[in-house]
Each structure stands twice: as structure tokens, then as C-alpha cells.
Image (cartoon, helix red, strand yellow):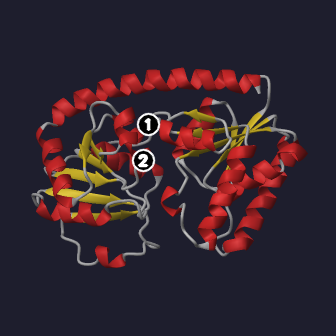
Amino acid sequence: MNKKIIWITWERQRRSLELAKALNARCYVLSEPDALQGIARYLYLIIKTAIVLVREKPGILFVQNPSIVLAAFACAFKKYFDYKLIVDRHSNFKLETLHSNSIKWKSFHFLSRYTIKNADMTIITNEYLSDIVGKLGGKGFILQDKLPEMALGEPFESDGKKHIVFISAFAEDEPLAEVIEAATFSDRNRIFHITGDCSKYGKKHLLRRLPPNIKLTGFLAEKDYQSLLMSADLLIVMTKKDHLINCGIYEAVAIGKPVIVSDTEAIKNYFKRGVIFSKYDSRSIAAAIRKGMTDNETVRENIRRLKEELFRDWEKRFGILLQIINEL
């Protein structure tokens, strides 16, 4: 690479860390004091971002979207700092709010159109989103997540029970209520772990009086998180959104674990074998759990083959990306 590359993100996500590492780019994960909220938070992070740009003077800047504010700032100051800008947007389009009258979402979509038009490239995860970028006057490039390195964790000793992990961020698009209901249909010898910090979750009533076979893990350190996944007999990674691919699916494939995923076109088009597709109603999820536990060894073998295919596909796509970057 003949230009200096740096990566800036305001949120710590595995996708950014893995892609920055593959690019040999220095990655800045910028954060703010807990007390800062709203406009004060954005001003603080913008100043920190500007300091990094002044110090590093990159030839090529990658930024992660989310945050849309970070992407907009990077577009606005592109000429001033004289860098080429690539926005890794993956699936942050909020299409369900496109016709909302809310000032918040009108502002979001205004900035969305602005960043797409002014970035030198926008990286997304599927053909549907690539078409949207093209129609809005941008240049899109499809690159799914790199299969992550999951080398920190170690499996727990067996306790004779079956463990199922729902990889969750307590986001609104996750079928949390449906997974909880499916767990109530399940054998009490199966323990369900729900990951993630639920402290800011808006539907706290769902988390009251959970059955004894459902455990909330809270936020886990990376090593503990990986150990939990490695110890699981089955993983669940689901979304109600049509054009989103959850990062947890790549984690499941990377460690060769059977995983239940949403039956959407974006996911089916990339994960063509090995995963267990399900609608996101509770009975469908319960049926998928039974299938995953019954056909466990067959699913594991198909996951192994899928891992090899995805690795080759990603390396090919990444090579094309490097060629494009060199020509910017």
C-alpha cells in the first residue's frame, strides 16, 4: 500500500478491529467520558477525531458508520485534510425510518445521503444495500465481515447439561421475547444464556421472573465471552430486519458452532450451508432448537465446510478492495 491508512471508530466493534488489522491500519477506537451525552458527546469526539487527523495525516481514512456523525464529519473535512475517505457502513441504513416525520430520522437520512455522495467509497454487506448506495450517487463495495480470530477463550468443563447461547445486544431488532418464550417450551436440562448489557433495555418487563433455565450473562469480558460461545452446544443469532447480517453469525462459523439464524434473503444469500434458518416467532425458534440439538454433528460438519468457503470468498473480495484502494 503506497498511502498511509488509519481507521477511526466511535464504537468498538469486532468488524472494524478485524478489517483494520487486515489492512495493517492503525485503529483508533475513540470514546468519551460516561458523563457526556448528546451534543457534548459529539463535540468531544469530533475534537478527538480532528486531533488524530492532524497528528496522523492519513492518505486514506476509514471510518465506521455507525456513527453517522463521524462519517459526516469525515466527509466535511476530507478536502481540508486531503485524504481519500472510505466509510465502512455495513448495514446502518435504518430503512424502517425512511418515511418517518421525526426530526431525528429526517436528520439521519439527510446525513446518510450526504455521506454516500461524498465518500470515495461506502462498504456494505449485501447487494440490496449496494443498489441503494448506487442510486444515491455513491460508490459501493460489498464486503462481509472477516471471520474473526477467537483464540482467547477456553471451553468450560461439562456439567452434563446442554447450553444454548443467544448472542444479544438487547437491540430492538432482536426477537428477545420470542427466544424467551421458546426457552419455556424447551427441556429444563437445556440452559439458555442471553449475553449483553440489559441495563438500558426499554422492555424490562420481559426480563422479570425468567424461568430458572434462562440466565442473563450481562456484559462479558472478551475472554469470558469467547469461552461461553466455545462451551455452547448451540448458538442463536437473530434479527427482525431484512437487510442486516449479525456479527454473531461470523463468530459462530469461526468457532464451528451450530447456529440458528434469521430466515432472511441477506443471510441466506451468504450463509448457504451449515446454519439453521428460522422465522423469528417462538414456535419456529423452538423447532430450530430441536433440530440443532438433534442433528448437531451433521450441522457441525456443514459449518466446517462453510467456514472454508467463506474464508476463500472473503480473501477474494478483500484482494479486490486492496486493488481499488491502491488506485484511489
User: What's under tag 1, amino acid-wise?
Assistant: Ala
Residue indicated by mark 2: 246
Q: Is residue 5 above or below residue 117?
A: above
Q: Position of residue 127 (x, y in %)?
A: 49, 36
Q: For the view shown, which residue lies furthest in the right direction?
A: 80
Residue 23, by quadrant, is top right
Q: Position of residue 186 (x, y in %)?
A: 12, 58
Residue 192, by quadrant, is bottom left
**Relative depth, front residue between 102 and 312:** 102
Crowding around mark 2 (Cα neighbors within 10 Å: few <14, some 14 to 19, many 20+) is some
User: What's under tag 2, amino acid-wise?
Assistant: Asn
Residue 35, by quadrant, is bottom right
The tag earlier along the polypeptide, 2 or 1, is 1
Crowding around mark 1 (Cα neighbors within 10 Å: few <14, some 14 to 19, many 20+) is few
Q: Is residue 124 above or below residue 42?
A: above
**Relative depth, front residue between 20 and 179:** 179
Residue indicated by mark 1: 151
Q: Is residue 104 above or below residue 62?
A: below
Q: Position of residue 30 (x, y in %)?
A: 69, 55
Nearer the observer: mark 2 or 1; the answer is: 2
User: Which quadrant holds the N terminus?
Assistant: top right
Is there any visible trace of residue 249 in the rendered image?
yes
For this view, does 221 lie left or right of residue 110?
left
**Who's the residue at 72% across and 72% down the image?**
39
Is there any visible trace of residue 28 in the rendered image?
no
Q: Is residue 93 above or below residue 266?
A: below
